[in-house]
Amino acid sequence: MPEPPLVSVPSSPLDFLSSPCWACDSNGRLIFANRALHALLGADVLTFDVVRDALHPDDRAPTLDALSAGRERREHVEQEARLRSASGEYRWHCIQSDPGLWEGRAVIFCVMHDIDALKGTEAALKESETRLRTALDGARLGLWEYEPASGREAWFGVQRELFGVSDVGDVHAIEDFYRLVHPDDIASVRAHEKAAMAGDVPFDIEFRVVRADGLVRWLRGVGQVERDETNTPTRLIGINYDVTERKEAEARLALLAHAGEVLSADLDVNATLERLADLAVPQLGDWCAVYVPRPDGTLRPLAFAHQDEGQKRLAARYFAAFPTRQDGAGAVARTFNDASPMVVPIITDEMLDAAPLPEEQRTLLRAFGLRSSLTVPLVLRGRVLGVLSLTRASSASPYGPSDVSFALELGRRAALALENARLYDEARSYGEQLERRVKERTHELDARNAALEAFAELSRDLTLERDPVALVGRAQEILVSLLPNGVSTYYERDGSRWRLKSHRGTFHNPELLPALSRGLPLGNTPNVDRPFESRTPFYQDVYDPDTARVVREHLTNVGSTASLPVLVGDDVRGVLIVGVYERRPWSAAERALLETAVRALGIALTRSAAVSALQAEREALAKRTVDLERANRDLEQFAYIASHDLQAPLRAATSFAGLLEREYGERLDARGQTFLNHIVEGGQHMKRLVDDLLAFSRLGTTMRPPKPVAASAAVELARRRLRAEFEVSGALLTFGDLPTVLADEDQLALLFEHLLSNAVKFHRRHVPPRVSITVERDGDCWCFHVADNGLGIEPRYFEKIFQIFQRLHPASRYEGTGVGLAIAKKIVERHGGRITVESRPGEGSTFSFTLPAPPAP
């Protein structure tokens, strides 16, 4: 059976609500709809089908389902949906339904509120959040906020990825964060947080976290404490980013330095190898064994280490039962014979099952829990002295290329230490000459260790320095210290030349540095051009002078060079060159060292540029804010002083002009009368300008505390003040019931006076001015619309007309001072509102402004 049509019920109080509302019975039939709903949908006759069809197709089903569920459960429901108005436009509404009674029947009352502007704001906010999130994710920065009062912390960006967890909410208790911090670092993080809150130190700390997969990562946290007016901390905001690679690089460099000290501390071969194994566990692996060749054709593990004594006993049993042969097929034997490293990134149970091993050996290997292995040769002067074997167990990360480079360098140092031990043994037999050779090698090793210790501090130094040239110079100092008899230069592009920006080391040829300082030709200097264009290092084991033809006559004593591009972000900033005064190949360890240093330098330069740009932007913004505030104060003060001081001479001039007209007017000829009229009219215009200036300057000082004011009374007062203008122009003003607003009564009347005066003044020829005032609710405010049928305004002048002294028409056509709309704008903004204009030339203008509504009683 079709639903009968429904018209509004005038006798119902709900019919006069400004918000659309309706009521449905238990069968979902529409039994009431107020006037606002009729107006919104543009229908004189309503049925529920009309309301349903007005819903946006994408919102129709979820909205009807929600209302139906609320009706069945007799509970409050809120649903957001787009509704098509009589104009055909879809707008967002919030539909609220509640159970109730209508003439004794159980019904569901529904009320709608227009939230289209709010949805637009939400969309803009989401877009802004998306851009911020993209920036944070791209920079691998995790953003966080912590409120001490609530003990809650919020995470944004890649925070979960940094901590390796998925079960921590966006907002959580601070203790959820501390549960992820490494147990050994919790106390220091808490203490640092407390000190930062107290204002003793800035919040900047590095700490470890234990990820859900068991991996330990290093993070750096940098934050800013926000305080209230009592200096009480209210919030701590900061970022986290992963510094594991840097910390591992520092630890490895420190380990190399420490290894040199330890390995050179004892010249006993067995003690040296045992120290080497102990050094490697647990930083490089869970297991470490050092194999040396034996006359019986085996490779004997002369030293092995593990943190668990039970595992060490199990290893001793394994080595005794299953010796490694030099001609075997295993990783240790192959590394020994090929003199090259071997990596097994992942050791699986399937690999153990497939290996041709006795079952007892396979069982023992499973008991070790091996997951990844790395073997490197201990080589000295082309001779393999042994094999360093490293193994990781359980969930540790697999070995990779960086581990290989580091293990090779450690192996080289171990081989050198073994050689030193051998030389020491020979020295006891061959006398003081051989003993001096051992001491020389020991001193060389100590010097390298000292240089490596300095390089281990490079990463920390680079994070503290902000000057780009100083950053480059610090990196060069470390590199030159690692390469005896070496020099370093750094170049950046400058037009068509390479400019020398920094240099370190001793230049043997005194003419070389002045020549380099004059610049090198771009595109004709391969030693600089090639790494810049290819973005990869360029090593010359035997230096070719033609790669820098302009200065080749000054480079005859250079033996080898290494040219490396310095990347800042995705761009090559410059080229760093290291040279030595001897011809020799660059070893893999030296290449890794140079490339690591340049990579660290690039990261530091990137951070320095970002910090400098951010600081400059903040300073510029702060300066602009101060300048604008000062300019505004000066403008108001100038307007007040100028208008106040001009009143006395202006009064005298107009008074004497009037006296002159009264006493001598009849004696003046027509030309004299014209001049006198100019004086009077100019004085009157000047008086209006001074009065408007004085009114504008006083707005900021004379505003009384806002109170409820009837807007209609303010409009009537303004109309009385403009009675003469209305009568002369034949203007007609219409307005209905206007609400009460929170305002300064005098300033509200002045606001309407200027808007109405503007509407009457700028009317079209032969068209009497027609002005209407309408109003609508806008959240906590009332929005007024003052519309006229006047000249209209081009859109490009919408902002200009609110600026003081800005006029669109010459004073000869329309009198005025150009201050009225500036006063109107300042009054609205003083009340916390906003004012805008919409207009089309030849059709009129509508000025809209908002004023706060009084709070509900």
Image (tube, helix red, strand yellow):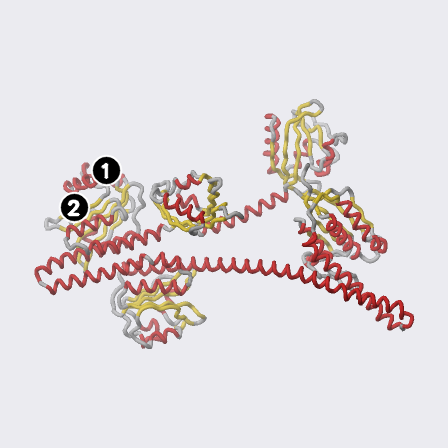
Disc 2 versus disc 1: distance between alpha carbons? 19 Å
- Label 2 crowd (10 A; few <14 / some 14-19 / many >=20): many
**For the image shown, how many numbered marks are present on the structure?**
2
Find residue 63 and report its image quarter.
Answer: top right
| Mark sitting earlier along the chain (2/1) | 2
Residue 777 at least partly seen: yes
Q: Which residue is mark 1?
A: 367
Q: Work out whether residue 112 or residue 740 is closer to the camera in this orientation and state it.
A: 740
The residue that label 2 is drawn on is: 324
Q: Residue at x 19, y 55 (%)?
A: 265
User: Taking 780 as reference, is 606 above or below it?
Assistant: below
Could you tell me the amino acid type at mark 2?
Answer: Thr
Residue type (three-letter) at the residue carrying disc 1? Ala
Relative to 421, is 848 on the left or the right? right
Q: Nearer the viewer, residue 607 or 547?
A: 607
* The quarter of the displayed image where residue 99 is located: top right
Residue 384 on image: x %, y %: 18, 55
Q: Secondary structure at mark 1?
A: helix
Q: Quadrant of the N terminus?
A: top right
- Tell which residue pokes out farthest to the right in this image: 666
Do tag 2 and tag 1 residues touch (Cβ < 8 Å)? no
**Closer to us: 537 or 216:** 216
Q: Image quadrant of residue 604?
A: bottom left
Quarter occupied by the C terminus: top right
Q: Position of residue 340 (x, y in %)?
A: 23, 54
Mark 2 or 1: the one toward you: 1
State the SS at label 2: strand
